[in-house]
Image (cartoon, helix red, strand yellow):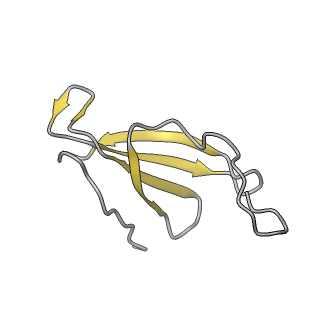
Amino acid sequence: NVKETGKLTPIGLAAPSVSPSFLTVHPNGRTLFAVNESRRYNGIANSGSVSAFSINHSTGALTPLNIVPSRGADPCHLTTDRT
């Protein structure tokens, strides 16, 4: 949240996630992706996960869509493709 002064103010937890780090937004602007840096996801050893959230542009709220295993521990650096 940026006020008219340019000062950032906290607005609370954006969305629940485990150890989120790198983020990217889909080119259509409607979905945010986050990697969750961990060594185990949902019982899968040596796997972090990737979370997807829908973005409400009116409120800035994020709504969880899904979480999938990354099939690699401590994932980072994700990107999207326009195709």
Measured from the top left, where is residue 81 in percent x and y? Answer: 38, 71
Q: Nearer the viewer, residue 59 or 8?
A: 8
Q: Quadrant of residue 17?
A: top left
What percent of the width, then of the height, locates residue 28? 56, 67
Residue 76 horizontal side relative to residue 20, left or right = left
Task: Report the label total.
Answer: 0
Give the position of the C terminus as an image quadrant: bottom left
Q: Residue at x 75, y 50 (%)?
A: 59
Where residue 40 sits, quadrant-wise, is: top left
* In this view, 48 is above or below 60: above
Q: Residue furthest left?
A: 45
The residue at 82%/69% (across/down) is: 5
Question: Where is residue 13 shown, x and y percent of the image?
Answer: 61, 39
Q: Position of residue 72 (x, y in %)?
A: 17, 47
Q: Residue 14 or 54: which is nearer the viewer? A: 14
Q: Up-down: is 34 above or below 7?
A: above
Residue at 26% in and 40% down: 38
Q: Residue furthest top?
A: 43
Up/down of 37 relative to 7, above or below:
above
* Residue at the limit of the structure toward the right, as seen here: 4
User: Which quadrant of the rendered structure holds the N terminus?
Assistant: bottom right
